[in-house]
Amino acid sequence: MAHRSGRHFLQIPGPTNVPDRVLRAIAQPTIDHRGPEFGLLGKEVLAGMKKVFQTSAGAVFIFPGSGTGCWEAALVNTLSPGDKVLMFDIGHFATLWRDVALRLGLQVEFVPGDWQSGVTPESVEARLREDSGHQIKAVAVVHNETSTGVTSRVGEIRKAIDRAAHPALFLVDTVSSLACMDYRHDEWGVDVCVAGSQKGLMLPPGLGFNAASPKALAAAKSAKLPRSYWDWAPMLRDNAGGYFPYTPSTNMLYGLREALSMLQEEGLPQVFARHARHAEATRRAAQAWGLPLGCRVPAEYSSSVTAVRVPEGLDADAVRKVALDRFDMSLGTGLGKLKGKVFRIGHLADFNDLTLLGTLAGVEMSLALAKVPHQQGGVAAAMQFLAGAAGSGK
Amino acid sequence: MAHRSGRHFLQIPGPTNVPDRVLRAIAQPTIDHRGPEFGLLGKEVLAGMKKVFQTSAGAVFIFPGSGTGCWEAALVNTLSPGDKVLMFDIGHFATLWRDVALRLGLQVEFVPGDWQSGVTPESVEARLREDSGHQIKAVAVVHNETSTGVTSRVGEIRKAIDRAAHPALFLVDTVSSLACMDYRHDEWGVDVCVAGSQKGLMLPPGLGFNAASPKALAAAKSAKLPRSYWDWAPMLRDNAGGYFPYTPSTNMLYGLREALSMLQEEGLPQVFARHARHAEATRRAAQAWGLPLGCRVPAEYSSSVTAVRVPEGLDADAVRKVALDRFDMSLGTGLGKLKGKVFRIGHLADFNDLTLLGTLAGVEMSLALAKVPHQQGGVAAAMQFLAGAAGSGK
Amino acid sequence: MAHRSGRHFLQIPGPTNVPDRVLRAIAQPTIDHRGPEFGLLGKEVLAGMKKVFQTSAGAVFIFPGSGTGCWEAALVNTLSPGDKVLMFDIGHFATLWRDVALRLGLQVEFVPGDWQSGVTPESVEARLREDSGHQIKAVAVVHNETSTGVTSRVGEIRKAIDRAAHPALFLVDTVSSLACMDYRHDEWGVDVCVAGSQKGLMLPPGLGFNAASPKALAAAKSAKLPRSYWDWAPMLRDNAGGYFPYTPSTNMLYGLREALSMLQEEGLPQVFARHARHAEATRRAAQAWGLPLGCRVPAEYSSSVTAVRVPEGLDADAVRKVALDRFDMSLGTGLGKLKGKVFRIGHLADFNDLTLLGTLAGVEMSLALAKVPHQQGGVAAAMQFLAGAAGSGK
Amino acid sequence: MAHRSGRHFLQIPGPTNVPDRVLRAIAQPTIDHRGPEFGLLGKEVLAGMKKVFQTSAGAVFIFPGSGTGCWEAALVNTLSPGDKVLMFDIGHFATLWRDVALRLGLQVEFVPGDWQSGVTPESVEARLREDSGHQIKAVAVVHNETSTGVTSRVGEIRKAIDRAAHPALFLVDTVSSLACMDYRHDEWGVDVCVAGSQKGLMLPPGLGFNAASPKALAAAKSAKLPRSYWDWAPMLRDNAGGYFPYTPSTNMLYGLREALSMLQEEGLPQVFARHARHAEATRRAAQAWGLPLGCRVPAEYSSSVTAVRVPEGLDADAVRKVALDRFDMSLGTGLGKLKGKVFRIGHLADFNDLTLLGTLAGVEMSLALAKVPHQQGGVAAAMQFLAGAAGSGK
């Protein structure tokens, strides 16, 4: 590839721009994964991840792998062949998780959706109430659907499950929300949470995570899906000393330790507020451009990613191509049935106001160059917000 | 941990001392895994790995994960529930692979062994000839048993299978041999090979590999074990363009590209010869010490790792503790039933004569300090060999 | 210092944002500065710097030190105590160079200037014509005055010297112009050029450079100012083999090799055009804001840095403080007699359109927050230019 | 250069093996050298260096440059043209410092020496007593002569000066002793100390240091040698806030901060003891080889470097060539009149027992391959010492 001056703008909704503190941490020499120094590292990152998941009752698991692998881990540790899982067709990643479940031999009831809104607590409650025989063993929800920029209200869904007095396990994917938006594993009564390293955790891809409630850990004892690599049991045993049952991704764990320090230095509430500000600034830009958002429900706006729709008949990927060729910026493509209809702006992880404004400027110029009908003034609207009292973060 | 001056000697048989060229490569900024620059990277590392596996007919798979995961991948892609696999009790890792197979619902016939020698071609041939009904669907062999320092003669085992005219798939673990000892995937007719990043490939842990023959790829079409994360099919489809079906470990792939360059610069035959020299020097040291090797068959000596036995009644881990506390060197522990009976010296990957001699000096001093009865002169014997014509590498 | 999310915007006119390729290069292990590997490195960077200076006739010198040191080197190698040097009061750095000359025991004739324009060829010619006794031994000009954003027309000044048929040496400071703006050492007949690592060369500070014409090298033989560290003679002798007379900054030379590769990959003409575009975009922003530039002569606009004046009675440093506190961006302060009157925007070295727009957005918001009267629309004007045909760089 | 497996053994007496903690520190992004974050860095490293010099009364100066430059700084800040300096011909670097003094216009009285022993307090006292007219303005001594492996007893020389009741300034070069051997700036009454980054401070080359006593600072006020770059006065002024009068080597200062942390973690007394142990082990090896040391006075043995003499008629550089070609180890060459007569083993900075033993093994094998008559057993003797109670460091 030809050399390009300056830093690439990696504004896909993950992998995100890895801060150089983390990159340098990852470049430390690999150590003996069975030695005492490793044990300290392991304990530190496991404890740190519990804070990020906001769990004290549950256990956290760190796998060498991806979030995709941890979708599998969530299912194989808690379910048995033929078990029924309630899932929701709210976007591309929800669909992929469904596919994982099917491949593993689970039954999936896939509730239709419009890919512009999240899972409603009402629909969950209604469906579970119908299931008086408790055939549904798990309800699986994507907290932040990366393909659409839509969140689902996990805390309220928990209450819906409770209202239905249904014993199903509650599985949640926070791959692109963890460490970007508030996620409360214990308080919201989630049983298994799925996450990955390459989004709000500011790491390169290569680690996947589960957080499991005591109920999920109990379920693991009788779950019958075959499992080996993703099995929680040997993890739980060895993690007690900070170790892992097979060779862990030592260097990624160095990066994780550094990222956890950064999150702690900034403070999780500040991290969430920052993401919310940048998301609002991005939406104001989109509104100024006169382009509709991928999310049609304001209460479900994502703080990590904003999908922007281009007018019918135009190709959203043409905007992305200009952004990459002309401005060295990567934007997210439309996935699955949104192919060509939306582009996605990632505004998450290690990020700040001026990088956001550079990003939005790149989008605004690319819209012009790709001849997408729009109003100018998106950057100006975002600046107005960010410099104003509302956007000051004070 | 307290600061210790100088470089740690990481002389376990993996993870190995990652060269700083690789560490710097890993510290490059993460890029869009769906962009054109990534496609070039993906194609380059896939092509490079085919050379390392010495395969042109087969396909190579790179997973975010560990070698353990790729044991699972080898099985789930080629076998069906209840299939019988012929495995051999030659060491700790062979036993762990057996356990994976059992957890996945396979039947394992586990041929007894003494943990001091490898799988014999004769035993394979004899057992397969008995299996006239072709109940055995796969023969699984560890090329270099990391726990014992014993290799199995994979090429000859292939011939034994052929002599028995048995259709079983031939699965081989090269986790600690690949890029250390000659391994010829095509020529030796292996169907699935399993490898990891953290040994001869000089990377941190975090990537696992499979190489699959056309016969294995064909078997994958009818294999019925449930699989999702480890499924070759979507990999094969996306790898054609240099991409992956889920987020790959981009930064580890940077490191892999660099490591492949280094292997190519040195040349695989030179890499193998170097490992053989260092292994021979290590054995001469052990002989001078008067301590027996973990491997009792000279034709099966490992070039990656040497297990050294301490006299009955002494604890090999005491030697390791002195080496770590006093000389900042990590040695490999005895695993499974070798616990306390052997320590293991890793002499693989990014390594040279003087680091080997520092290592052997550390062992010799630790033997003295741990009061293990031995003769001095191990380092001297190794120096004699390395400086002499036989060890000159010329 | 508290952790701040995202990348700092280092928009002072140097040190500049060091690209991570260069940072990684600098992090390579230090080697023996007297060994064969070093000789290759030394020769490569010396040859590469000749291309950057656009000289083949002259010699290039690389010192562990700063540009300030190389001001001294330029003088002590070519002049004798009491020699007269013609210098020009065009800004803060010109004044500092004057001070160096005075401290070393030279006589300086310091031609007055307004710190808003460069050295005029006419004034040089007139003064030299008067000097029929050739008392003036050197004419010293700053190519790009970093404190004002004003360039002097070096090529035309050469012609002026020639018209006056004056034998004075021609000394030029290109600290903030080299590798940003066209500089032609041979063609423009410069005798000694002074440069530093931390501007267009994209390195951290720590290296200083001289380029010397054959006439300057000849002058060095009779120059009588005491010199040791900065002496060209032992450098010239040892540089022939790629070595240095005292320990060189090995790791910075690694970085230099990498930076030279990047400049070559992009191409010097492209590098100059890029800087010109970004400077023009910045001026359009300033014009939209209604704020005057520090440079009043369009033919003398700098491509590296733009000084922007704030209205009388306001403190330019208040803008800088907001930019730093609120947006994590460093802008250049007003130096010397421009203290508080201007702020300076660096737009040089490893840089691109979106980072410039983030920078300009930060300035525009900081102007508002610091209550500096201005028009909005600076960012919009820059986007208009950069996205338009004129600014396309095609 | 061809790729070589494993780490290079950089066993010259500096530059030394830079620890990767320091290399990573250096690779941090460059910041504004006039901003608040820099001020904290500057103050921290200046304070840290005072501890390393063991001075509280004096001032420390950090220059972008080399130790050679700081020889110059020591002289130009304290002396006037024609001043007489008493120097001692004890080795190559003492000679080079003499040359610097001569080039700067000082008179040097150069006391003859044998390059096998240090400056004796007796000779200093005798010469100063003779100088009743106090023509000698400074006494300049190299603490650890890197070319010979000989130290001079700085504390005792101070007492000799005092006994002679002579007002001369006392200048000391600790380039290769600082942070390796005990050096007490205040207690020993040194007026100006000279140091560099690339030895005991574990940094790449590129920084030079002075420590100055109140008496030296007073002398600077009347010293008349021309000076600009190396002038202490503006440094002293700006250092108060943590800043520098011209652009400092920011990234090297990051490295210095990290190196100071490492020294503090280990503890200076432990650092000195470690160097002493490794030097003793090296001497025992040389004794076993039957090769004489470059230093003939046991009380003056260096802890940083050991020069080893080869028998008359043999070329010491032949040993070095074998060590480099065959074992990838750099040893120090014989400098000046020791060319070909000695090779030098650096055993300083970030170093440990096993790396020393690898080094000595490389030397022992190179002696054999270069056919230098010697006894085997050097490594064995060093191991004996290091593993024994005397060498245990406990």
Image (tube, coloured by chain):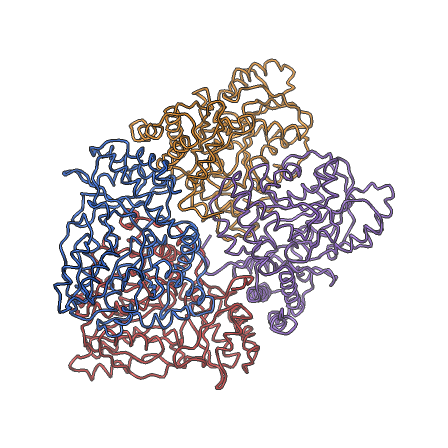
Chain colours: A orange, B purple, C blue, D red
Residue C26, given in percent of the width and then of the height, sits at 42, 56
Vertical order, D95 against C105 (above or below): below
Give C288 or B144, whichever is nearer the viewer.
C288
Residue extending farthest bottom: D313
Residue C195 visible within the image: yes
> Residue C124: which quarter of the image?
bottom left
Q: Is residue A206 left or right of residue C157?
A: right
In the image: residue D307, left or right of residue D219: right
Residue B304's x, y, as percent? 64, 58
Q: Is residue D64 visible?
A: no
Asked if residue B256 is positioned above or below residue D10 in the image, the reply reads above
Tell me the quadrant of the picture where the C terminus of chain B can be found.
Answer: bottom right
Q: Is residue D281 shown left or right of residue C293?
A: right
* Direction left: furthest residue: C130
Give the side of residue C392 with respect to residue B284, left or right: left
On screen, residue A239 above or below A366: below
Q: Position of residue A62 (x, y in %)?
A: 55, 39
| D6 vs C156, nearest the viewer | C156
Residue B75 lies, in percent from the top left, at 71, 41
Compare residues C64 and A327 and report the one nearer the observer: A327
Image quadrant of residue B240?
A: top right
Q: Tag count in the figure?
A: 0
